[in-house]
Image: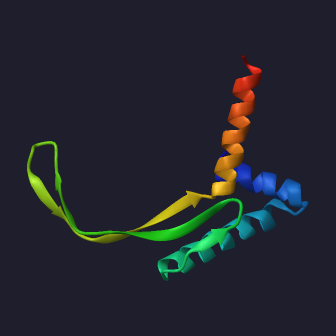
Amino acid sequence: MTQKEFIRALAFESRISDAMARKIVQYFKRVVRRTVEDGEAVQLTGLCEFRLRHLAARQVQIPSGERIEMPAMDLPVCRVSQSWRDECKARAKVAQASSL
């Protein structure tokens, strides 16, 4: 699903205009980015958590065999909630059992 399709689906489900749904998505992204960039996590219970993951400085080997130093950095990550993962696993087991 593209962002445009998501906006249409959001508008349909919530019975608002596409323009209003587009603004909501823009505001959502802005709030998540600002919060995570400030070092706080955004936890959407039952869906996911957005946060910064710190990667320490390290040496890596590039394809030529040369080792280079990678600086420390913070990367934004999104982790799917455990409850959603469990639901997906349960559905997969049911689907597998019904196909036997």
Residue nearest the observer in this picture, 88 or 26: 88
Is residue 34 depicted above or below 53 in this figure? Answer: below
Q: Say which of 62 and 95 sits in front.
A: 95
Name the side, left or right, on which 37 lies relative to 71.
right
Q: Is residue 23 above or below residue 5?
A: below
Indicate the position of residue 45 as horizontal and vertical percent values.
70, 66
81 with respect to 19 (left or right): left
If the image is split into quadrants, where does the C terminus sit?
top right
Is residue 85 toward the left or the right of residue 10 in the image?
left
Q: Nearer the viewer, residue 22 or 56?
A: 56
Residue shown at 68% from the left, 59% from the top: 47
Q: Which residue is at the front of the view, 23 or 76? A: 76
Residue located farthest toward the right when viewing the structure as drawn? 15
Q: Which colouring convention does the figure follow?
A: rainbow
Q: Residue at x 55, y 73 (%)?
A: 33
Percent x, y of residue 63: 16, 42
Disc tally is 0
Q: Is residue 74 above or below residue 15?
A: below
Residue 69 position (above or below residue 66): below
Q: As drawn, is 68 to the left or to the right of 24?
A: left
**What residue is rendered at 88% in x and 63% in y?**
16
Please provide percent x and percent y for residue 10: 80, 57
Residue 91's quadrant in the figure? top right
Query: Residue 72: x, y in percent?
Result: 27, 71
Quadrant holding the N terminus: top right
